[in-house]
Image (tube, rainbow, N blue to C red):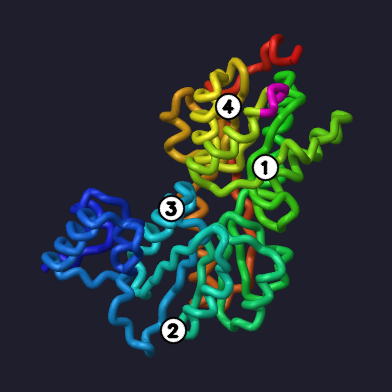
Amino acid sequence: MKTYTIRDIATLAGVSVTTVSRVLNHRPDVNKETRERIERIIEEKHFLGNTNARGLKQSAEVIAIVIRGRSNPFLNALTEAILSRADHLSDTLITEYIDEKDDEFRTALRLTRQHRVKGILFVGSLIDGRVQAIHGLDIPVVFTTVDAKNASLPRASSVAINDREMGRVVAESLYNLGHRRVAIFGSNPVAGDSLAMRFQGFCEVWKNHGLSFDPLDYRECRFSFESGYETAMEYFASAPHTTALFAMSDSVAVGAVRALRDLSLRVPEDVSVIGFDGTSVSRFSIPRLSTVEQPVDEIAQESIQLLLDMIESGAAPRHLLVEAFWKPRESLAPPSSSRLAE
């Protein structure tokens, strides 16, 4: 009898591995029809895969994946890649999706009370003072997408891109095209996460060119199409001088492009727009979105390998930086003379 994997179930159901994982973990963010189709296939194929946390005995050891940002397409794609890369493991994996405003470290502590967790993957984490909550955990952890080198955790590794450098790349590209008035949509600009690093890199370039970034041109927003749209509608309705937008995620950028269209502003003729992450939507949006592409498969593979090395052979923590790629596309152009004159 064939042994079915979570990837097999996803293929048969015509959905992503992440969606199957959500059903297995009783997540509410799957529509009824899809859930019923997946559950029917699971029953027909007698699936008992390693991401199925139902019925786990307290004695079973598990690897936990905590995803901070359930509506973020990039993090969902990264989680799916991690699950696919880990599908061959004999270990049980459990996934926990939380809101981007929730506390991933308290979530991790709760999971360690509920299960015998032998390792944790944090996807989309924010490293700040809250991280001390897991300082006493005597299990290996890996942070993906954020450099945890300075987190002072004795058993923590990380895999990330050089966010500060990519912020510099975006800033230099905009400066060289002639943009001087730029809006930035992101999270807390003084936090210790990857997004704050991008902003700091941007500001370094502006300073090197004798410019200063106006704090009023920075807007905090959630990482969704809706938030990108709403933030852009509010900002650009009263900022006719701005010729470019640097959004800290592709979903925010795409939402902003729609808002600009509704405000009768053209992209890129009136406002250039740059996203971040390199999700598939960036290649198919109109216009095609300029973005910084993160190597999802490489991040997933390295994250799994780092965690297994620490679990299985007691390897020392490591902090890897992988290469990201600047992808200038149709949403980027020099500012128009009419906009510069405003």
Which span of residues is magenta-colored? 238-242
Question: Vertical placement of 304 versus 229: above or below?
Answer: below
Three-letter amino acid code at disc 2? Gln
**Amino acid type for the residue under numbered disc 3:** Asn
Nearest to the eye among marks 2 and 1: give it: 1
Q: Quadrant of the N terminus?
A: bottom left
Point out the tag, 3 or 4, that comes first from the N-terminus.
3
Q: Is residue 164 magenta?
A: no
Secondary structure beneath dot 1 equals strand
Task: Give the mark nearest the N terminus, 1 or 4.
Answer: 1
Viewer can see residue 199:
yes
- Count of labels in the image: 4
Q: Quadrant of residue 277?
A: top right
Residue bearing the label numbered 4: 328
Query: What kind of residue is marked 4?
Result: Pro
Image location of residue 68, percent across then percent down: 52, 60
**Residue at horizontal 61%, vertical 24%?**
272
Residue 124 shown left or right of residue 111 in the figure: right
Disc marking residue 219: 1
Give the image quarter of residue 171: top right
Q: Residues within 10 Å of mark 2 (few under 14, many from 20)?
A: few
Residue 293 appears in the figure: no
**Label 1, label 4: how many angstroms apart (C-alpha)?**
23 Å
Dot 2 or dot 4: first in sequence order is 2
Read off the residue under disc 3.
76
Q: Label 1 is placed on what type of residue? A: Arg
